[in-house]
């Protein structure tokens, strides 16, 4: 006696196919609004800036009323940007800024994170919020607040140093204003970087701490042998963010320019591109400067990542 297998089992498979297709499309449907906004607000401006950096615009008449001519300029805008001594000086100034300020901030936020995550920490939640609070203050407001501590006649620090110790402090002079800006940046972003490191510390398994304590390791040995090696990814991430942020300095220099004659209109790379675009009305060279700033940030971040990856092997 022979029997034939039922063919009804093929029907559920046929029914599952449309459902699996719908499931595979669901994430893209949900991501569509974000992708659209991301393309319009991030990718499109980058493409436009790169296009303008290779374009030369000639305006006829006082305001271009007689006509505007646009033509492909090859690398002429980049040549003009690189021949601008003030722009090159601003990049060099930010190199010096980053070499000094970034390591100090990373060390400081690492120490704070280790202290707040230690077993002896008291009220860690309160202090985490207090250290993170400056990051929630807009950069413009933070700079204005700190300027009251930098300006002679308004600053209680300068008054006390002068009357009690005979010191003549000048936070806005040519040799000190860069470090006054560094102080504002450190105050603003130390708490933010600290939170990233704390998140990495909380991901360390508690079994490692228990095993280390059984072996007689103290807090210093645990921090040096367990915590610091395991938070290396967070340290690399915060350093890369800080390198990129250094080249993006704008609000602090622009606002302190009002009270410090040592800050000119091209003190930082971003301020130089802004001045070129809106003061000199040369948007194409400003676009070239913006692309160069992005390239410098990319190269520095890439070199740092390669060096850290090589040293970890």
Image (cartoon, rainbow, N blue to C red):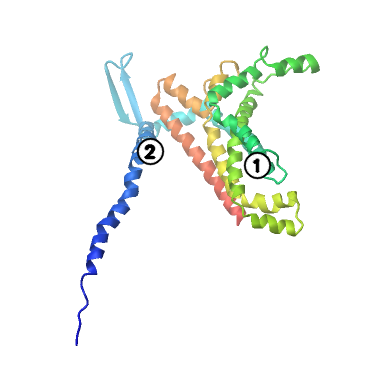
Residue that extends furthest to the right in the rendered view of this protein: 165
Q: Quadrant of residue 1?
A: bottom left
**Height in image: 156 above or below 298?**
above
Residue that extends furthest to the top in the rendered view of this protein: 153
Is there CB contact under 8 Å for labels 1 and 2?
Answer: no
In the image, residue 155 lies at what x, y percent? Answer: 68, 16
Secondary structure under tag 1 reads: helix
Foreground disc of the pair 1, 2: 1
Residue corresponding to mark 1: 113
Residue corresponding to mark 2: 38
**Residue at x 64%, y 35% (from the top left corner):** 126
Residue that extends furthest to the bottom in the rendered view of this protein: 1
Is residue 84 shown to the viewer in this render? no
Q: Looking at the image, is mark 1 or mark 2 earlier in the sequence?
A: 2
Q: Is residue 84 left or right of residue 143?
A: left
What is the distance, in whole Å, between disc 1 and disc 2 at their CAs? 33 Å
In the image, residue 136 lies at what x, y percent? Answer: 55, 30
Nearer the observer, 265 or 22: 22
Nearer the observer, 253 or 13: 13
């Amino acid at each position: 006696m022979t029997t034939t297998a039922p063919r009804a089992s093929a029907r559920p498979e046929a029914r599952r196919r449309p459902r699996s297709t719908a499931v595979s499309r669901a994430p893209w449907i949900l991501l569509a609004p974000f992708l659209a906004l991301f393309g319009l607000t991030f990718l499109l401006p980058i493409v436009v800036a790169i296009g303008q950096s290779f374009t030369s615009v000639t305006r006829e008449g006082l305001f271009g009323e007689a006509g505007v001519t646009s033509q492909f300029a090859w690398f002429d805008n980049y040549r003009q940007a690189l021949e601008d001594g003030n722009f090159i000086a601003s990049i060099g100034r930010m190199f010096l800024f980053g070499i000094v300020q970034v390591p100090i901030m990373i060390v400081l936020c690492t120490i704070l994170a280790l202290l707040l995550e230690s077993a002896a920490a008291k009220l860690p939640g309160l202090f985490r919020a207090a250290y993170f609070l400056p990051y929630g203050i807009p950069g413009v407001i933070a700079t204005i607040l700190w300027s009251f501590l930098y300006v002679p006649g308004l600053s209680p620090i300068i008054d006390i140093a002068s009357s009690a110790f005979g010191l003549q402090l000048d936070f806005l002079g040519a040799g000190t204003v860069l470090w006054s800006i560094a102080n504002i940046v450190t105050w603003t972003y130390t708490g933010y970087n600290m939170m990233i490191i704390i998140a990495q510390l909380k991901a360390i398994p508690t079994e490692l701490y228990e095993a280390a304590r059984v072996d007689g390791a103290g807090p210093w040995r645990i921090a040096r042998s367990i915590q610091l090696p395991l938070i290396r990814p967070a340290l690399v991430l915060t350093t890369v963010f800080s390198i990129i942020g250094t080249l993006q300095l704008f609000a602090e220099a622009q606002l302190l320019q009002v009270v410090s004659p040592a800050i000119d209109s091209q003190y930082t790379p971003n301020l130089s591109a802004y001045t070129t675009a809106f003061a000199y009305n040369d948007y194409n060279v400003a676009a070239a400067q913006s692309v160069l700033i992005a390239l410098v940030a990319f190269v520095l971040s890439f070199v740092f990542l390669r060096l850290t990856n090589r040293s970890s092997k």
